[in-house]
Image (cartoon, rainbow, N blue to C red):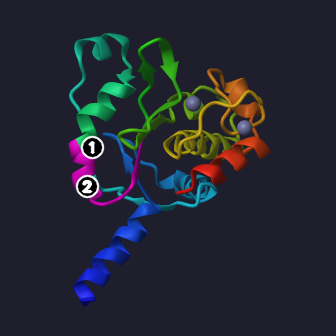
């Protein structure tokens, strides 16, 4: 076996466990790196932060009108940019500070497309919607939302237990009710799907 062949195999194997975390437009996630790192580790993934990468996508008329970004539209349009930025990386998580929406929902904290292996999340409501938010609560919310979307990328669906990371949440109260961990059932399911 040639060295080159072995190197390629090693690289491919390593890339299977990697998630590239990228900022969307003017997002600066330096203060959230630890939480984003921890979220990746819950799912056995190693995070690579591409903080200098400027991921952008022109806003549609609807997005401009709503002052929100259509998460699925951005993910779809940004796919090529993402693949170029983090070649060979299995998963991508885009972090935005703009509010997001999805087809049937007035807003979403985040959204994942498992087929494309890309997720997008926003800190907009998690961080800016509460004046007396403590730094630890803020980090906890980022950790939980990032973990939730990574869980979808790894093949988990929504969980009926409100305290589980994979519970569906559409209010800050619901986010705060989650524990920063998977329930037993979701842990088992994660094991079953493997990496
Ligand atoms: Zn979800
Ligand atoms: Zn669960």
In this rendering, is residue 187 above or below 161?
Answer: below
Magenta span of residues: 80-94
Left or right: residue 184 compared with residue 175: right
Q: Position of residue 32 (x, y in %)?
A: 54, 51
Which quarter of the rendering shows the N terminus?
Answer: bottom left
Say whether marks 1 and 2 touch (CB < 8 Å): yes
Q: In which quarter of the image is ligand 2?
A: top right
Secondary structure beneath dot 1 equals loop
For the residue pair 79 and 106, the one nearer the viewer reads as 79
Left or right: residue 98 compared with residue 166: left
Q: Which residue is drawn at 36% across and 23% down?
A: 69
| Nearer the camera: disc 1 or disc 2 | 2
Magenta-drawn stretch contains 73: no
Q: Which residue is drawn at 35% across and 68% down?
A: 12
From the image, tell me which residue sits under label 1: 55
Residue 140: quadrant of the picture: top right
From the image, tell me which residue sits under label 2: 85
Mark 1, residues whose alpha carbon is within 10 Å: few (<14), some, or many (≥20)?
Answer: many
Secondary structure beneath dot 2 equals helix
Magenta-drawn stretch contains 82: yes
Q: Which of marks 1 and 2 is nearer the N terminus?
A: 1
In this rendering, is residue 56 above or below 82?
Answer: above
Residue 178 visible somewhere in the drawing: yes
């Amino acid at each position: 076996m040639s060295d080159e062949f072995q190197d390629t195999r090693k690289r491919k194997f390593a890339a299977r466990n990697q998630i590239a975390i990228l900022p969307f437009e003017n997002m600066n996630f330096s203060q959230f790196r630890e939480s984003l790192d921890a979220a990746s580790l819950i799912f056995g993934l190693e995070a690579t932060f591409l903080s200098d990468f400027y991921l952008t996508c022109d806003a549609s008329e609807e997005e401009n009108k709503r002052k929100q970004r259509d998460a699925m539209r951005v993910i779809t349009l940004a796919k090529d940019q993402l693949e170029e930025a983090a070649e060979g990386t299995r998963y991508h998580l885009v972090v935005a500070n703009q509010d997001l929406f999805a087809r049937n929902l007035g807003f979403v904290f985040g959204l994942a497309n498992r087929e494309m292996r890309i997720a997008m999340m926003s800190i907009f409501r998690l961080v800016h919607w509460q004046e007396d938010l403590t730094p630890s609560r803020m980090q906890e919310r980022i950790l939980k939302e990032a973990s939730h979307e990574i869980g979808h990328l790894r093949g988990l669906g929504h969980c009926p237990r409100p305290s589980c990371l994979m519970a569906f949440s559409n209010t800050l109260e619901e986010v705060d009710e989650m524990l920063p961990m998977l329930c037993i059932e979701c842990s088992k399911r994660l094991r079953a799907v493997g990496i």
